[in-house]
Image (spheres, coloured by chain):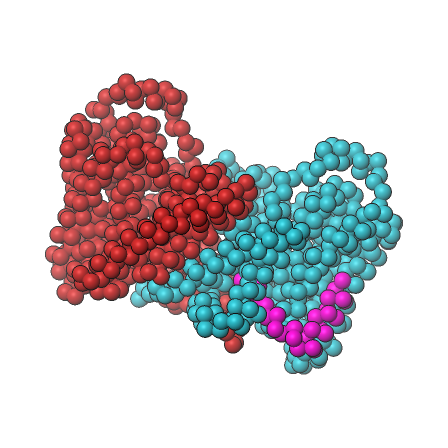
Chain colours: A red, B cyan
Amino acid sequence: MSAAPVPPIAAHQLLVFLLQVGVLLLLAIALGRLAARCGLPAIVGELSAGVLLGPSLFGWLAPGAAAWLLPSDPGQMHLLDAVGQIAVLLLVGLTGIEMDLPMIRRRGGTALRVSLAGLLVPLALGIGLGFPLAGLLGIGPADRRLFALFLGVAMCVSAVPVIAKTLMDMNLIHRDVGQLTLAAGMIDDTFGWLMLSVVSAMTVGGLSAGVFTHAVGGLLLVVLIALLVRRPVVHRALRLSGGSEERTVAMAAAMILLAAAGTQALGLEAVFGAYLCGLLIGSSGEFDRAGTASLRMVVLAVLAPVFFATAGLRIDLRALTEPTVLGAALIVLGVAVLGKFAGAYIGARLSRLSRWEALALGAGMNARGVIEVIVAMVGLRLGILDTRTYTIIVLVAVVTSVMAPPLLRLAMKRVDCTEEEERRLAAWGGAPARRSPERADP
Amino acid sequence: MSAAPVPPIAAHQLLVFLLQVGVLLLLAIALGRLAARCGLPAIVGELSAGVLLGPSLFGWLAPGAAAWLLPSDPGQMHLLDAVGQIAVLLLVGLTGIEMDLPMIRRRGGTALRVSLAGLLVPLALGIGLGFPLAGLLGIGPADRRLFALFLGVAMCVSAVPVIAKTLMDMNLIHRDVGQLTLAAGMIDDTFGWLMLSVVSAMTVGGLSAGVFTHAVGGLLLVVLIALLVRRPVVHRALRLSGGSEERTVAMAAAMILLAAAGTQALGLEAVFGAYLCGLLIGSSGEFDRAGTASLRMVVLAVLAPVFFATAGLRIDLRALTEPTVLGAALIVLGVAVLGKFAGAYIGARLSRLSRWEALALGAGMNARGVIEVIVAMVGLRLGILDTRTYTIIVLVAVVTSVMAPPLLRLAMKRVDCTEEEERRLAAWGGAPARRSPERADP
């Protein structure tokens, strides 16, 4: 706003932007509903909305119309991306708000062992796979190490929202295995955002020990700041806005966006700040969960579908017609599933759980859904992924999420209900305790 | 998405965008709260957030920092504007949803007379004032007629949200005068969006009888389409999404944005489509008002403050240090107040209301708040207004809104409560019937 005022958005640009948001949202609602009816996670339908409008179908059948609605003009497409960014940051912030820290503490050691093994095995496998895969896909030698690192991170995340929804649908959320899966998934999430931040910093700063130290130092600094501002800033802000839902919603949104800007400014990832801020808000005694119910509803109903549809736009299924890419996709998928199962299994067996319980944990934590899509979008934004590798990673997210329910059902058949579990189930009326909208937790 | 994928938003651009939204929102919350504590409408505080960050203060005290946070790069500022556009369209759509058509029908003739007189007198005065004012401010002869027309439209709008809030606060909403004011204000709103669309079309197409006919024809076409799609599309969409709040919210948002895109495509204003779509949704038997409660909350708590803060950014109070501009502002303010009071008074007296009732109606309808700010932003976007005239019109919006409560109180002292009114008040428990968040209706 310095000297000359900025010209406003031109009429045509505004028209295209509104059409993009409206059409993507409408299609995402319709396909999300269809997916839910077929017993699939809503995110599968929402991604499909973008896939249909993207180069895979609409851009291929009607290139002229597609170029009009989704031109390759950054000034135009960034308007849509800006809405998507707000959406994803609020979504991740809400994930943080809804973390159940006391539950994680209760499940303590076992959850940590399952989580760490479930992180480290796929991380190692992912990094190990990354180098030959980069060669196979013709990624330049300079970028291979970064790609391998990123693939490792992408392999090891778990999607708490999809897991929670699946567990609730299957009435497993109050069983020991269900709670362990959730707790381990939540720890996974936290580490996932941490590692993504480090990779992000190394993309910008270069792959050196110095940058790594710097990034880890930055993360520690951020966590320290978070602990320091927790009481004087977050608690006070929430107390000041307490009592009025309107103020609580606005304050939570403002804090999440500012925290995201903070980590972004430090060269870490914006999502990490949003997540951490959500944790601080959710664990504050001043915070009333009902206060953000409407924010949650609008983010889940309107913003998340728009984000996932825009994420779908970047997918090009035609890439899979290339045998190398299809082969790479199958290998990545296989390694991702194997790594997560093996890791969770090892962690569970080390904690003296039964074989079937260990397999059930693996089946649950294997679902990567929402989180992996967000990670893939970050990879695309950082330039680590191209359309082919992005398509592969989103596919892994979708397939692992779709796999979870049948595998869980299979494993849980062999796990007997303990007495304590039966008491807990009876206390919750044997039915899902939480209200279960179509997507459940973000 | 044609050949080459669009590069994503750059890291620095994302950072600045997140900071802009976060800082504007936080400041808007704080100042909105301060305004409410001082008995002023929240919008005054929210606009002030933008004014403080804009060229009037922050840009003047710290030009370097201001140019960093709010650079004059369209690619950057349009991201913020895109969020503001979504905000304003959903806000106007909700205004449409909350129109109380049965109440307007009950108040029929009187409301229409008050509304029309309250529209026509300021419209005529505004157009009449526009020509000499354009000369005074050095607006080129080619643009004078358009400016005069626009000033007329800007003069004649009323702000239902501010009015409703004021009436509720003063416990007048169930009195005859209160209901009449609301009904007339709602009719005003509808005409305001219609006229704004015509002016908008003439800005693009030129000031000719042909363009005028074309624009009016377009409006009739849109209304016809709206009536035609009402049952097969809107009702069906709402029925399909009925029962699930998540789907109702998403569907309402998608329809509002698509309708806005529709009128924008016809060269009319996007806000008109959003408003009309809101009317269709709100008047549908399939629609459950509770279904959009969370959308309303998030729009009022988060999106509207961001929009009004961005509207405030465009204000430059330094323009008022020029004696001509200050003089023009005072003249416009005087004519706006006089015109609305005179119009409403004439309409009320023609309907055999008492003198004090007529004055109370004028005092209520004089508040222009939210709506006039939206109109001014459209004028800026169309290039009809510059920073000076924009600042003047937003000032009129603010001052008339602040004037409403004391003037209403003064006039209502002389209006006795009828027996029927007393029964109605008793039925509502003498207290505001509707839950009253800080801003009340959008």
Residue beneath the point at 37% across and 44% down? A279
Residue B109 in picture, x, y percent from top left: 80, 48
Image height of A442 relative to A129, above or below:
above
Query: Is A15 or B320 nearer to us in this picture?
Result: B320
Residue B42 in picture, x, y percent from top left: 61, 53
Report if residue B323 lies within the magenta region. yes
Q: Quadrant of the C terminus of chain A?
A: top left
Can residue A415 be seen here? The reply is yes
Residue beneath the point at 50% across and 35% down? B243
Magenta highlight range = B310-337
Residue A307 in picture, x, y percent from top left: 39, 52
Can residue A86 be seen here? The reply is no
Image quadrant assignment for residue B57: bottom right
Image height of A74 relative to A125, above or below:
below
Name the side, left or right, on which A272 lies relative to B125.
Answer: left
Main secondary structure of the magenta stretch:
helix
Query: Is B90 or B72 nearer to us in this picture?
Result: B72
Residue beneath the point at 71% across and 79% down? B136
Image height of A437 relative to B362, above or below:
above
Image height of A412 relative to B36, above or below:
above
